[in-house]
Image (tube, rainbow, N blue to C red):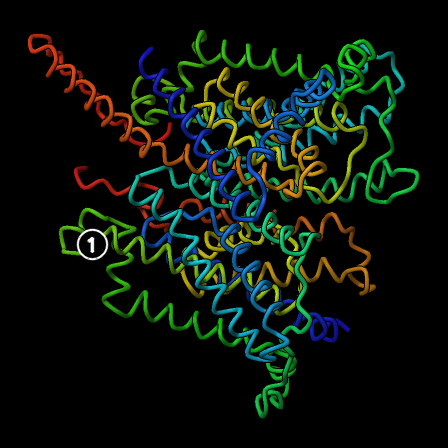
Amino acid sequence: MWWSIIEQIFPYAIAYTVPLLITALGGLYSERSGVVNIGLEGLMVVGFFTGALVISRLESVLPGTAIWLGLLLAMIAGALFSLLHAFASITLNANQVISGTALNMIAEALTVYLARHLTGSGNIQIVNGLIRRDIPLLAEIPVLGRLFFTRTYATTWVVLAILAFSWFLLYKTPFGLRLRACGENPQAADAAGVNVYRMRYLAVMISGACAGLGGAIILVTYSGEFNGTVAGLGFLALAALIFGQWKPWGILGATFFFGLASTMANVSQAIPALARIPGIFLKNFPYIVTLLVLIFFSKTTQGPRAAGEPYDKGKR
Amino acid sequence: MKKEAGKEYIIALAAVGLGLIAGALLMLVTGNNPLLGFYYLFSGGLKNLERIGNTLATATPLIFTGLSVAFAFKTGLFNIGASGQMLIGGLCATAIGLTFAWPKPLLLTVIVIASALGGALWGLVPGLLKAKFNVHEVVCTIMMNWIAYWSVYYIIPAYFKGAYLETESRRIPAAASLKVKWLTELFDGSYINLGFFLALIAVVVIAYILERTTLGYELKAVGHNRYAAEYAGINANRNIILSMVIAGTCAGLGGAAFYVGYASNMQIGVMPSQGFDGMAVALLGANSPWGVLLAAIFFGVLHSGKGFMNAMTHVPPEIADTIIATVIYFAATSVLIERCWERWQKHRAEKKKADLPPAGEGKEQKAAGGAG
């Protein structure tokens, strides 16, 4: 019986995990370069809005491609919007938490303002989202096929590819080493000839693009409608980043844990075995576990050492 | 010191000015008349006694959350959890208000104490985790927000369900409401309530703690440099915990002011935006209690006027939130304003020097980076 429950909720858990994963991955670039990005939530909202705007306008003209165009433009919008955070926290040495909070507030207010101006209600609907597909051949694999390769969204594979690429980029290339050096010891990186400012700008823009993509993926997979909020997913991505100890594969594990736990709480009413557990425990479970994990990891935390500190060239 | 305070006011005013200009541009771009928009926005918040009362009532929770964020910030902590602390404070207030049928003075006293304790508990957890395990308070308070959100989501329908809707509590009886007849009548039937006076008291108390007590001195010392403070014999961990507890208490009281003062029942599934606006209030108020009071009232005007503006024009009400958010961004990037201001001062000083050759004081102020 448990197995059939798991088979049932797995596709939903994965759908919920993917936007969280790509957003947390964006946060990884930013924090590894030394810039804390609390604005992930707002950047997701920007991507969510841009995706909805583009797809709702173009889907009748360009059916099919409109979705991918929407995802691409959402990434660009996220990257551009993140420049506000980069400018404040890198060029002006502003407090990164405050600047990120301002970013969240601007994104949530501005997108709803514009949406209301455009549609009246503040919601933007798209008619067609992505369609779930079985992967040929792989779906036939006995156990794993049912779990991972049936009824999947194409975006899931795109995000997993970005994850693998990011791991390679950050840990196996000189560029990744330089980026991480900016977050560990920017003075040393500078002395070694790395342009810390440019590196951090790039990392923040990548985080904006990833979070924008995350917001748009919510739209084209399980939401179908822009409604002005991503309900704290950006903050959850931030928590997953720390839960995953600022490592790509750790983030994958952490976000999947959130995805599975949230999906279990969401579908608990439909599944008798879960319905017996009070909802308040199921819903709070991921957050309490995160707190416990943070306590557990507190002694060995391996966060980027210079994250949150503005880079001051004159400082020794 | 005096000069520094003056500079902070100039920065705050400049940020507000730039935020309003950004709002005007946004109205222009979306095809509205900004002058008309601002006229209705401000008259909606200030036109008559009733609207002024509503503005103060809207500002009340913001004063509390602003104090909460500002107080924690003095100890170098970011309290992103004011929303959750407010929810728990409101939950405690609502639970007691709906359970006991005591005379109003007693009931209100218990409600206020309970909401303060609830908020304090929600601040204690991040404080403890920060002090004992070095868990970052930003992540911890975010988690605490969601735990508060889901707890309210299940507790209200289970024990205090309203008569018609599953998603809200029963109405608070008159004896448990912070609204009082004489005050409501004084302001022609507005939402203003005793919470506002409670907020004023909180401003005075927090200002007193910060400026006149050893505790305040220690808290600020830890905020400036934790290690130096420890070297001087200050128990940093104890101060971190205390700071978060007091911050939580403020936000918890804000919950009482909102849920049993401004509102008359508790809705579920809503994360109160006042928690995040509190960060804006604290930042604009330069983390000083009096600055928080002024900033909260300003935001109160915008929030309570936006409905009127939306009714009279085609400007969506979110313009108020956009203006607030932009103000915060400009406050966060105040270094830019500071630099312009200094350049202007220098320019003026040089001009003076040119006019009066002997008087050459050459006062130079170095930019103290950051917004703290």
Q: Residue furthest left?
A: B358
Crowd class of label 1 (few under 14; some 14 to 19; many from 20; radius 10 Å): some
Where residue B106 sits, quadrant-wise, is top right
Q: Position of residue A309 (x, y in %)?
A: 32, 41
Left or right: residue A155 compared with residue B40: left
Secondary structure of the residue carrying tag 1 is loop
Tell me the residue at 45%/62% (across/down): A210
Horizontal and vertical percent position of residue B122: 61, 32
Query: In percent of the image, x 79 and y 40: which residue is there?
Result: B155
Rendered-image quadrant of the C terminus of chain B: top left
Q: Is residue B64 above or below residue A244?
A: above
Q: Chain of mark 1?
A: A
Residue A145 falls in image quadrant: bottom right
* Residue sitting at x 33%, y 10%: B2
Asked whether, in this view, residue B235 is left or right of residue A188, the answer is right
Is B67 in front, or is B56? Answer: B56
Q: Amino acid at mark 1?
A: Asn
Which of these two is toward me, B363 or A184? B363
Q: Which residue is mark 1?
A: A195
Residue B191 seen in render:
yes
